[in-house]
């Protein structure tokens, strides 16, 4: 079908990852007149991503595996990614002047390793005459006759098309769009634990642990103990899976953490084969010495004992600390979340176009949707794909 050659006036509300990219793509068509609303600089929300390096996406071709990394949005994204996936994203970024590379763990970063560089390069595409930046906070969006009204703290505007991309926080400005908003909750966040006797664990990290908790699926990844809390990609996964549960002292979530890839029999063999060595030497093959020392202190085990002198209970305690270390989650660390669960109900948005099923001409993209993914580049990939698909409507 031939594209209509009429000028279109399009509002993009929020110029973070999703809104910024859709604006870049829309302005490539000179018939689109794009008005971008944000009180921040375009793409500035990218600056802290990936620890300042911007983890753009994840390099995995198996789409089913890819979408299994989203506790909310899996089915919706199967449709979205079948139209625009991580391979196409990397190609698009290359076309926009941003080369990427894949790290050993499959996370994709810009060759510059700089989120600032990504933000700068993407922003440079907005220096065009058909992009109008409105540095205003939008307070309300609603339909009036044939138009959408956008109210800001300063002005009132009319548009035929509005793309909302205001991220995972604050939904007041869309209250009048008649969409269902699933209650926002912290998704990727650090967890508060009851164990306060392990003073010296703070700062200790473990790679590729396996965590089992309640009825949630087992998760794998790195963890880090901090003062009175536990964090890291594997903890974020548990936090995301349990985003809508409330934990407290009386109703904690028990985490069973396998801190080493070795099994019970490997550890028992090590004890048997090194019975003349000190316990701390034998066990520090499986975990940092500081950890073993702390487990021994907390459980009153003499660290200078030889392995052969361990009694049955002591052996059990030490082995379990490695293969089934238990901590109890009593809450979430306030404001530690980097992504929120909840947002616009996906049943009310068309995954083929990102258009609202309630109002024609209204679109939602990015984290404002009830979509959240694990760490690894999954949250930004949602933004890039939503933005690209949305841009195809114009
Ligand atoms: C510290 C940190 C690190 C992260 N690292 C990664 C990573 O490496 N990889 C990854 O995939 N994900 C990462 N994420 C998550 C990722 O950044 C977000 O999922 C993504 O930015 C969401 O994009 P968005 O466009 O939907 O919203 P945002 O990027 O949050 O953009 C929303 C924009 O809307 C504007 N806005 C909001 N309300 C209004 C209003 N009323 N009027 C006008 N403008 C408004 C805001 O100012 C903002 O600019 C990280 C998040 C954080 C916090």
Image (cartoon, helix red, strand yellow):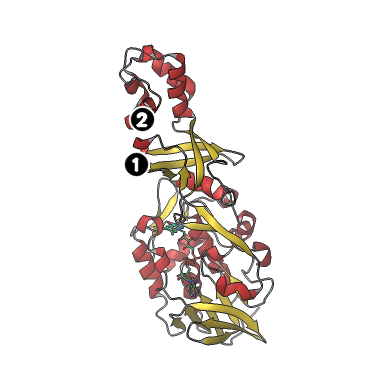
In the rendered image, the quadrant that contains the C terminus is bottom right
Q: At 59% across and 84% down in the image, what residue appears?
A: 149
Q: Is residue 249 above or below residue 183?
A: above
Horizontally, residue 362 falls left or right of residue 325, namely: right
Q: Is residue 221 above or below residue 78?
A: above
Q: At 59% across and 38% down in the image, what residue appears?
A: 214
For residue 9, what is the image quadrant?
bottom right
Return the x and y of residue 124 as percentages of the image width and height. 38, 74
Residue 68 shows in this picture: yes
Identify the element where label 2 is drawn.
helix
Single out the residue that lies furthest toward the front: 250
- How many labels sit on residues? 2
Return the x and y of residue 108 as percentages of the image width and height. 43, 54
In the rendered image, the quadrant that contains the N terminus is bottom right
- Nearest to the eye among marks 1 and 2: give it: 2
Q: Is residue 339 above or below residue 252?
A: below
Return the x and y of residue 205 as percentages of the image width and height. 38, 39
Horizontally, residue 38 falls left or right of residue 301, namely: right
Residue 97 shows in this picture: no
Q: Which mark is residue 254?
A: none
Q: Residues within 10 Å of mark 2 (few under 14, many from 20)?
A: some
Q: Nearer the viewer, residue 75 or 189?
A: 189
Residue underneath mark 2: 294
For residue 368, what is the image quadrant?
bottom right
Q: At 31% across and 18% down in the image, what residue appears?
A: 278
Q: Nearer the viewer, residue 36 or 4?
A: 36
Q: Are marks 1 and 2 in contact (CB under 8 Å)?
A: no
Q: Which one is earlier in the sequence, the residue at label 1 or at label 2?
A: 1
Q: Nearer the viewer, residue 72 or 386?
A: 72
Residue underneath mark 1: 203
């Amino acid at each position: 079908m031939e594209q209509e050659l009429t000028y279109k006036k399009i509002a993009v509300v929020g110029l973070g990852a999703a809104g910024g990219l859709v604006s870049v793509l829309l302005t490539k068509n000179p018939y689109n007149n794009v008005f971008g609303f944000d009180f921040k600089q375009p793409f500035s929300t990218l600056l802290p991503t990936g620890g300042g390096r911007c983890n753009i996406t994840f390099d995995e071709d198996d789409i089913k595996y890819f979408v299994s990394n989203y506790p909310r949005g899996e089915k919706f994204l199967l449709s979205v990614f079948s139209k625009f996936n991580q391979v196409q994203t990397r190609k698009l970024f290359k076309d926009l002047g941003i080369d990427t590379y894949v790290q050993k763990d499959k996370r994709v970063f810009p060759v510059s390793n700089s989120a600032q560089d990504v933000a700068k390069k993407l922003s440079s595409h907005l220096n065009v005459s058909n992009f109008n930046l409105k540095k205003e906070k939008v307070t309300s969006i609603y339909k009036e006759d044939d138009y959408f009204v956008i109210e800001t703290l300063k002005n009132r505007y009319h548009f035929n098309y509005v793309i909302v991309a205001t991220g995972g926080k604050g939904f007041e400005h869309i209250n009048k769009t008649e969409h269902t908003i699933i209650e926002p909750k912290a998704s990727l966040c650090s967890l508060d634990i009851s164990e306060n006797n392990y003073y010296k664990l703070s700062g200790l990290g473990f790679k590729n642990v396996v965590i089992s908790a309640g009825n949630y699926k087992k998760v794998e990844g790195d963890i880090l103990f901090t003062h009175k809390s536990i964090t890291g990609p594997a903890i974020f996964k548990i936090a995301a899976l349990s985003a809508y549960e409330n934990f407290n002292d009386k109703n904690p979530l028990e985490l069973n953490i396998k801190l080493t890839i070795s099994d019970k029999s490997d550890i028992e063999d090590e004890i048997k084969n090194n019975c003349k060595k000190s316990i701390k030497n034998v066990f520090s093959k499986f975990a940092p010495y500081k950890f073993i020392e702390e487990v021994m202190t907390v459980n009153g085990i003499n660290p200078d004992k030889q392995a052969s002198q361990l009694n049955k209970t002591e052996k059990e305690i030490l082995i379990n600390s490695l293969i089934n270390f238990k901590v109890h989650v009593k809450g979430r660390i306030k404001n530690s979340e980097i992504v929120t669960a909840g947002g616009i109900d996906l049943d009310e948005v068309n995954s083929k176009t990102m258009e609202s099923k309630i109002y024609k001409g209204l679109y939602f993209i990015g984290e404002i949707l009830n979509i959240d993914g694990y760490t690894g580049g999954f949250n930004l990939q949602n933004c890039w794909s939503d933005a690209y698909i949305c841009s195809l409507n114009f």
